[in-house]
Image (tube, rainbow, N blue to C red):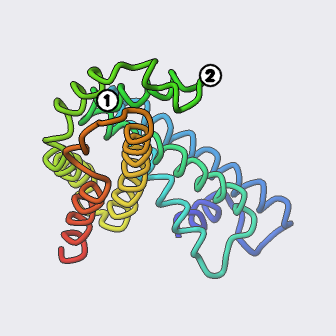
């Protein structure tokens, strides 16, 4: 165990010496490790790669020490911090994937959110013309299955051997994108009367994501 080896190198055994000294030493080690992780991430100019370094390392630290038996109680605070950092950066990583592959659609959804910050949903039809919505739908939704496949391939390229984390990322991507799509679907149905059904539905989106989930289970 790397943490225990580091403690021994520092002259402090996990079960030897005053408990406060052990706690302080291991906490400092974990803090130093977190600093190194962030510095390594900052060396990447590409946002996707930077977030990848953060989620991989914080996920690893959290999973290893959260499931370790017996637990090292003195670093559980850092374990919780690692989990929080993983979740925070996973959200950003998921959002980055969607914005990278579907920038126009993602920007359009963000624009809707901004318009509705101080307005009721029913007012959307007066804030964004129906023709503008139609144009965006025609430009982006017909190729949605291909876009989702491209996102999957990008995740697979980023995490070629870490299948457990890849599955977690893919589930998070499905939840995020499906939530946004359902919201848009509902807004269109509620605000734009006589609007023809969207060329893709939330059921289609779920099917596209789950097809790749099946690929993961058989790989």
Instruction: Give the residue at x 43% y 50%.
Output: 179
Quadrant where the C terminus sits is bottom left
Where does residue 178 sit, x and y in percent of width and height? 38, 52
Query: What separation in Å lies between label 1 and label 2 (alpha carbons)?
Result: 34 Å
206 in relation to 142, above or below: below
Where does residue 202 sit, x and y in percent of width and height? 32, 54
- Secondary structure of residue under mark 1: loop
Instruction: Give the residue at x 75% y 75%.
Output: 15
209 in relation to 93, above or below: below
Disc 2: CA contacts within 10 A as few (<14), some (14-19) or many (>=20): few
Disc 1: CA contacts within 10 A as few (<14), some (14-19) or many (>=20): few
Q: Nearer the viewer, mark 1 or mark 2?
A: 2
Instruction: Give the residue at x 49% y 43%.
Output: 89
Instruction: Give residue 46's mark.
Output: 1
In the image, taking residue 102 as reference, residue 127 lies left or right, namely right
- Secondary structure of residue under mark 2: loop
**Location of residue 125 (image quadrant):** top left
Q: Is residue 53 visible?
A: no
Instruction: Give the residue at x 55% y 61%.
Output: 62
Where does residue 30 sit, x and y in percent of width and height? 63, 52
Where does residue 22 sit, x and y in percent of width and height? 77, 62
> Count the marks: how many?
2
Q: Between residues 99 and 165, which one lies in front from this camera angle?
A: 99
Instruction: Give residue 24's mark.
Output: none
Identify the residue under disc 2. Answer: 118
**Location of residue 16 (image quadrant):** bottom right
186 in relation to 211, above or below: above
Of all residues shown, which one is farthest toward the front? 194
* Label 1 vs 2, first from the N-terminus: 1
Q: Is residue 47 visible?
A: yes
Q: Are marks 1 and 2 in contact (CB under 8 Å)?
A: no
Q: Between residues 162 and 190, which one lies in front from this camera angle?
A: 190
């Amino acid at each position: 165990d790397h943490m225990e080896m580091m403690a021994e190198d520092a002259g402090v055994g996990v079960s030897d010496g005053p408990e406060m000294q052990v706690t302080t030493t291991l906490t400092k080690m974990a803090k130093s490790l977190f600093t190194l992780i962030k510095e390594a991430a900052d060396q990447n100019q590409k946002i996707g790669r930077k977030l990848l370094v953060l989620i991989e390392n914080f996920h690893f630290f959290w999973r290893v020490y959260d499931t370790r038996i017996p637990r090292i109680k003195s670093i559980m605070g850092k374990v919780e911090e690692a989990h929080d950092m993983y979740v925070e950066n996973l959200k950003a990583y998921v959002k980055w994937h969607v914005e990278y592959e579907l920038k126009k659609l993602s920007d359009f959804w963000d624009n809707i959110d901004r318009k509705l910050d101080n307005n009721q949903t029913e007012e959307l039809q007066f804030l964004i013309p129906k023709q503008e919505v139609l144009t965006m739908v025609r430009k982006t939704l017909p190729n949605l299955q291909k876009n989702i496949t491209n996102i999957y391939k990008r995740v697979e390229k980023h995490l070629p051997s870490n299948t457990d984390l890849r599955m977690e990322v893919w589930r998070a991507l499905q939840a995020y994108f499906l939530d946004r799509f359902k919201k848009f679907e509902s807004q269109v149905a509620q605000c734009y009367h006589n609007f023809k059904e969207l060329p893709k539905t939330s059921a289609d989106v779920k099917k596209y994501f789950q097809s790749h989930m099946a690929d993961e289970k058989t790989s």
